[in-house]
Image (cartoon, rainbow, N blue to C red):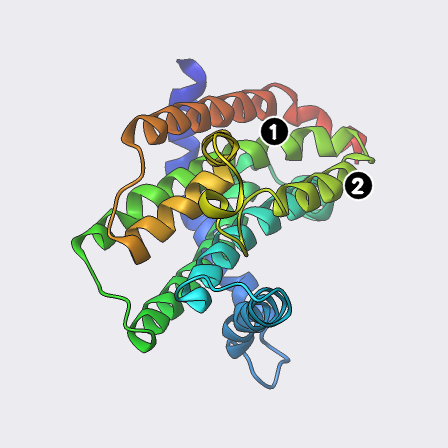
Amino acid sequence: MRIIKLFIKNLKKYFEYALYSAKAELKSEVANSYLNWIWWILEPICMMLIYIFVVEIVFKSKEPNFPVFVFIGITVWNFFSKMITISVRLVKTKKMIISKVYLPKYILVLEKSFVFAFKSFISFGLILILMLLFRVPFTMYLLSFIIIFLLLYIITFGLCCIIMHFGTYIEDLTNVCTIGLKFLLYFSGIFYNIETKVPAPFNHILVNVNPIAFIIDGFRKIFMYATFPNIMIIIGWFFIGLLLSAIGVKLIHKYENSYVKVI
Protein backbone atom coordinates (compact mmCIF):
# COMPACT_ATOMS: atom_id res chain seq x y z
CA MET A 1 0.00 0.00 0.00
CA ARG A 2 2.87 2.35 0.83
CA ILE A 3 4.44 1.65 -2.57
CA ILE A 4 1.20 2.56 -4.31
CA LYS A 5 0.93 5.85 -2.42
CA LEU A 6 4.55 6.66 -3.21
CA PHE A 7 4.04 5.79 -6.87
CA ILE A 8 1.00 8.08 -7.14
CA LYS A 9 2.88 10.86 -5.33
CA ASN A 10 5.88 10.56 -7.68
CA LEU A 11 3.60 10.33 -10.69
CA LYS A 12 2.04 13.69 -9.80
CA LYS A 13 5.41 15.22 -8.98
CA TYR A 14 7.30 14.10 -12.10
CA PHE A 15 4.48 13.94 -14.66
CA GLU A 16 5.32 17.34 -16.15
CA TYR A 17 9.00 16.37 -16.39
CA ALA A 18 8.11 13.15 -18.26
CA LEU A 19 5.82 15.07 -20.60
CA TYR A 20 8.40 17.80 -21.28
CA SER A 21 11.14 15.22 -21.80
CA ALA A 22 8.95 13.31 -24.26
CA LYS A 23 8.25 16.49 -26.23
CA ALA A 24 11.96 17.30 -26.33
CA GLU A 25 12.79 13.81 -27.59
CA LEU A 26 10.16 13.99 -30.32
CA LYS A 27 11.51 17.35 -31.47
CA SER A 28 15.11 16.11 -31.45
CA GLU A 29 14.18 13.09 -33.59
CA VAL A 30 13.15 15.29 -36.49
CA ALA A 31 15.39 18.30 -35.87
CA ASN A 32 17.84 17.54 -38.70
CA SER A 33 15.47 15.60 -40.95
CA TYR A 34 14.17 16.89 -44.26
CA LEU A 35 10.82 15.11 -43.86
CA ASN A 36 10.49 15.86 -40.13
CA TRP A 37 7.44 14.22 -38.52
CA ILE A 38 6.39 12.67 -41.83
CA TRP A 39 8.76 9.80 -41.00
CA TRP A 40 6.38 8.81 -38.20
CA ILE A 41 3.76 8.22 -40.88
CA LEU A 42 6.03 6.71 -43.53
CA GLU A 43 7.49 4.00 -41.30
CA PRO A 44 4.24 2.13 -40.49
CA ILE A 45 2.95 2.69 -44.05
CA CYS A 46 6.10 1.12 -45.53
CA MET A 47 5.79 -1.84 -43.17
CA MET A 48 2.14 -2.22 -44.20
CA LEU A 49 3.10 -2.26 -47.90
CA ILE A 50 5.75 -4.91 -47.26
CA TYR A 51 3.26 -7.18 -45.45
CA ILE A 52 0.67 -6.61 -48.19
CA PHE A 53 3.20 -7.68 -50.82
CA VAL A 54 4.35 -10.76 -48.92
CA VAL A 55 0.97 -11.98 -47.68
CA GLU A 56 -1.44 -10.97 -50.43
CA ILE A 57 0.76 -11.18 -53.53
CA VAL A 58 3.33 -13.86 -52.66
CA PHE A 59 1.17 -16.14 -50.49
CA LYS A 60 -2.15 -15.26 -52.18
CA SER A 61 -4.03 -14.54 -48.95
CA LYS A 62 -7.48 -12.98 -49.33
CA GLU A 63 -8.06 -11.37 -45.93
CA PRO A 64 -10.83 -8.74 -46.31
CA ASN A 65 -9.61 -5.14 -46.00
CA PHE A 66 -6.09 -6.42 -45.46
CA PRO A 67 -4.36 -2.98 -45.39
CA VAL A 68 -6.55 -1.96 -42.42
CA PHE A 69 -6.13 -5.40 -40.86
CA VAL A 70 -2.34 -5.41 -40.99
CA PHE A 71 -1.94 -1.71 -40.11
CA ILE A 72 -3.73 -2.33 -36.79
CA GLY A 73 -1.32 -5.16 -36.02
CA ILE A 74 1.73 -3.07 -36.94
CA THR A 75 0.57 -0.16 -34.77
CA VAL A 76 0.12 -2.31 -31.68
CA TRP A 77 3.33 -4.24 -32.28
CA ASN A 78 5.44 -1.13 -32.81
CA PHE A 79 4.34 0.37 -29.50
CA PHE A 80 4.94 -2.85 -27.56
CA SER A 81 8.18 -4.03 -29.20
CA LYS A 82 9.89 -0.63 -29.24
CA MET A 83 9.03 -0.04 -25.59
CA ILE A 84 10.43 -3.43 -24.61
CA THR A 85 13.57 -3.00 -26.71
CA ILE A 86 14.42 0.44 -25.36
CA SER A 87 13.65 -0.45 -21.73
CA VAL A 88 16.37 -3.11 -21.48
CA ARG A 89 19.16 -0.52 -21.47
CA LEU A 90 17.15 2.49 -20.37
CA VAL A 91 18.98 3.04 -17.07
CA LYS A 92 22.37 2.82 -18.76
CA THR A 93 21.23 5.12 -21.57
CA LYS A 94 20.10 7.74 -19.04
CA LYS A 95 23.09 7.37 -16.71
CA MET A 96 24.14 11.01 -17.15
CA ILE A 97 20.81 12.10 -15.69
CA ILE A 98 20.30 9.58 -12.91
CA SER A 99 23.88 9.89 -11.67
CA LYS A 100 23.39 13.62 -11.03
CA VAL A 101 19.79 14.03 -9.84
CA TYR A 102 17.29 11.78 -8.15
CA LEU A 103 14.51 10.57 -10.36
CA PRO A 104 12.24 7.57 -9.73
CA LYS A 105 13.46 5.25 -12.45
CA TYR A 106 10.00 4.20 -13.60
CA ILE A 107 9.53 7.81 -14.70
CA LEU A 108 12.03 6.99 -17.44
CA VAL A 109 9.63 4.30 -18.68
CA LEU A 110 6.76 6.77 -18.41
CA GLU A 111 8.60 9.32 -20.54
CA LYS A 112 9.35 6.76 -23.26
CA SER A 113 5.74 5.57 -23.20
CA PHE A 114 4.58 9.13 -23.97
CA VAL A 115 6.87 9.21 -27.01
CA PHE A 116 5.64 5.93 -28.47
CA ALA A 117 2.01 6.55 -27.46
CA PHE A 118 2.09 9.80 -29.45
CA LYS A 119 3.38 7.94 -32.52
CA SER A 120 0.76 5.23 -31.99
CA PHE A 121 -2.04 7.81 -31.97
CA ILE A 122 -0.78 9.09 -35.31
CA SER A 123 -0.96 5.53 -36.64
CA PHE A 124 -4.47 5.04 -35.26
CA GLY A 125 -5.46 8.24 -37.05
CA LEU A 126 -4.13 6.71 -40.27
CA ILE A 127 -6.22 3.61 -39.57
CA LEU A 128 -9.35 5.77 -39.55
CA ILE A 129 -8.31 7.21 -42.91
CA LEU A 130 -7.76 3.70 -44.29
CA MET A 131 -11.19 2.72 -43.02
CA LEU A 132 -12.68 5.56 -45.05
CA LEU A 133 -10.71 4.55 -48.15
CA PHE A 134 -11.76 0.89 -47.89
CA ARG A 135 -15.30 1.74 -46.80
CA VAL A 136 -15.07 -0.01 -43.46
CA PRO A 137 -18.08 1.29 -41.52
CA PHE A 138 -17.58 3.40 -38.39
CA THR A 139 -19.54 2.03 -35.42
CA MET A 140 -20.13 2.84 -31.77
CA TYR A 141 -17.61 0.14 -30.87
CA LEU A 142 -14.86 2.61 -31.75
CA LEU A 143 -15.65 4.40 -28.50
CA SER A 144 -14.16 1.45 -26.60
CA PHE A 145 -10.76 2.24 -28.15
CA ILE A 146 -9.48 3.75 -24.90
CA ILE A 147 -10.22 0.53 -22.97
CA ILE A 148 -8.13 -1.63 -25.31
CA PHE A 149 -5.32 0.92 -25.50
CA LEU A 150 -5.25 1.28 -21.72
CA LEU A 151 -4.89 -2.50 -21.47
CA LEU A 152 -1.97 -2.39 -23.91
CA TYR A 153 -0.38 0.47 -21.97
CA ILE A 154 -0.65 -1.15 -18.53
CA ILE A 155 0.76 -4.51 -19.67
CA THR A 156 3.59 -2.83 -21.58
CA PHE A 157 4.43 -0.47 -18.70
CA GLY A 158 4.59 -3.33 -16.20
CA LEU A 159 6.79 -5.51 -18.41
CA CYS A 160 9.07 -2.58 -19.24
CA CYS A 161 9.62 -1.71 -15.57
CA ILE A 162 10.58 -5.31 -14.80
CA ILE A 163 12.82 -5.59 -17.87
CA MET A 164 14.46 -2.23 -17.15
CA HIS A 165 15.33 -3.38 -13.63
CA PHE A 166 16.91 -6.69 -14.67
CA GLY A 167 18.47 -5.14 -17.79
CA THR A 168 20.50 -2.88 -15.51
CA TYR A 169 22.26 -5.94 -14.06
CA ILE A 170 22.10 -8.51 -16.87
CA GLU A 171 23.85 -7.50 -20.09
CA ASP A 172 22.62 -10.56 -21.99
CA LEU A 173 18.98 -9.59 -21.43
CA THR A 174 19.17 -7.44 -24.58
CA ASN A 175 19.77 -10.54 -26.70
CA VAL A 176 17.11 -12.51 -24.83
CA CYS A 177 14.51 -9.80 -25.46
CA THR A 178 15.47 -9.56 -29.14
CA ILE A 179 14.96 -13.30 -29.62
CA GLY A 180 11.79 -13.29 -27.52
CA LEU A 181 10.28 -10.45 -29.55
CA LYS A 182 11.05 -12.22 -32.83
CA PHE A 183 9.35 -15.34 -31.49
CA LEU A 184 6.35 -13.37 -30.26
CA LEU A 185 6.07 -11.49 -33.56
CA TYR A 186 5.00 -14.62 -35.43
CA PHE A 187 2.57 -15.74 -32.73
CA SER A 188 0.68 -12.45 -32.43
CA GLY A 189 -1.25 -12.51 -35.71
CA ILE A 190 0.14 -9.23 -37.03
CA PHE A 191 -0.05 -10.22 -40.69
CA TYR A 192 -2.46 -13.16 -40.52
CA ASN A 193 -5.77 -14.00 -38.85
CA ILE A 194 -5.18 -16.41 -35.99
CA GLU A 195 -8.88 -17.29 -35.82
CA THR A 196 -8.94 -18.59 -39.41
CA LYS A 197 -5.34 -19.68 -40.04
CA VAL A 198 -4.73 -21.67 -36.84
CA PRO A 199 -6.91 -24.77 -36.28
CA ALA A 200 -9.28 -24.94 -33.31
CA PRO A 201 -8.94 -25.04 -30.36
CA PHE A 202 -5.36 -23.75 -30.64
CA ASN A 203 -6.50 -20.53 -32.31
CA HIS A 204 -8.57 -19.48 -29.28
CA ILE A 205 -5.82 -20.56 -26.89
CA LEU A 206 -3.18 -18.60 -28.83
CA VAL A 207 -5.28 -15.43 -28.88
CA ASN A 208 -6.30 -15.56 -25.22
CA VAL A 209 -2.95 -16.52 -23.61
CA ASN A 210 -0.89 -14.08 -25.67
CA PRO A 211 -1.77 -10.56 -24.50
CA ILE A 212 -0.45 -8.89 -27.67
CA ALA A 213 -2.44 -11.24 -29.90
CA PHE A 214 -5.52 -10.60 -27.75
CA ILE A 215 -5.07 -6.82 -27.90
CA ILE A 216 -4.48 -6.82 -31.67
CA ASP A 217 -7.58 -8.98 -32.09
CA GLY A 218 -9.47 -6.62 -29.79
CA PHE A 219 -8.56 -3.55 -31.84
CA ARG A 220 -9.56 -5.34 -35.05
CA LYS A 221 -12.91 -6.26 -33.56
CA ILE A 222 -13.80 -2.71 -32.57
CA PHE A 223 -12.38 -1.11 -35.75
CA MET A 224 -13.36 -3.65 -38.40
CA TYR A 225 -15.89 -6.19 -37.18
CA ALA A 226 -18.24 -4.12 -34.96
CA THR A 227 -17.85 -6.47 -31.98
CA PHE A 228 -16.27 -6.26 -28.54
CA PRO A 229 -13.62 -8.64 -27.11
CA ASN A 230 -14.45 -11.04 -24.30
CA ILE A 231 -14.95 -8.79 -21.27
CA MET A 232 -13.85 -11.44 -18.76
CA ILE A 233 -10.54 -11.93 -20.56
CA ILE A 234 -10.05 -8.15 -20.69
CA ILE A 235 -10.59 -7.95 -16.92
CA GLY A 236 -8.19 -10.85 -16.40
CA TRP A 237 -5.44 -9.21 -18.43
CA PHE A 238 -6.07 -5.89 -16.67
CA PHE A 239 -5.36 -7.56 -13.33
CA ILE A 240 -2.25 -9.23 -14.74
CA GLY A 241 -1.09 -5.89 -16.13
CA LEU A 242 -1.63 -4.16 -12.79
CA LEU A 243 0.22 -7.00 -11.05
CA LEU A 244 3.16 -6.70 -13.46
CA SER A 245 3.21 -2.93 -12.91
CA ALA A 246 3.16 -3.36 -9.12
CA ILE A 247 6.02 -5.88 -9.27
CA GLY A 248 8.05 -3.63 -11.57
CA VAL A 249 7.54 -0.49 -9.49
CA LYS A 250 8.36 -2.37 -6.27
CA LEU A 251 11.57 -3.81 -7.74
CA ILE A 252 12.67 -0.38 -8.94
CA HIS A 253 11.81 1.28 -5.64
CA LYS A 254 13.76 -1.34 -3.70
CA TYR A 255 16.92 -1.44 -5.82
CA GLU A 256 17.12 1.88 -7.69
CA ASN A 257 19.71 3.32 -5.30
CA SER A 258 22.15 0.62 -6.44
CA TYR A 259 21.70 1.34 -10.16
CA VAL A 260 24.34 4.10 -10.16
CA LYS A 261 26.92 1.69 -8.74
CA VAL A 262 26.21 -0.85 -11.49
CA ILE A 263 26.36 1.57 -14.42
Looking at the rendering, in which quadrant would you find the N terminus?
A: top left
The image shows residue 81 at horizontal and vertical percentages of 60, 48
Q: Is residue 177 above or below residue 43?
A: above
Residue under the point 65% across and 48% down: 86
Disc 1 or 2, which lies upstream in sequence?
Answer: 1
- Judged by depth in the image, the label closer to the viewer, 1 or 2, is 2
Quarter placement of the C terminus? top right
For the point 82% across and 35% down, which residue is it? 171
- Badge 2 marks a residue whose secondary structure is helix
Q: Residue at x 64, y 27 (%)?
A: 256
Q: SS at mark 1? A: helix
Q: Which residue is mark 2?
A: 175
Q: Nearer the viewer, residue 143 or 96?
A: 143
Residue visible at 54% across and 47% down in the picture? 80
Q: Position of residue 252 (x, y in %)?
A: 60, 26
For the residue marked with disc 1, what is the amino acid?
Ile
Q: What amino acid is found at the position of numbered circle 2 in the picture?
A: Asn
* Circle number at residue 225: none
From the image, tell me which residue sits under label 1: 162
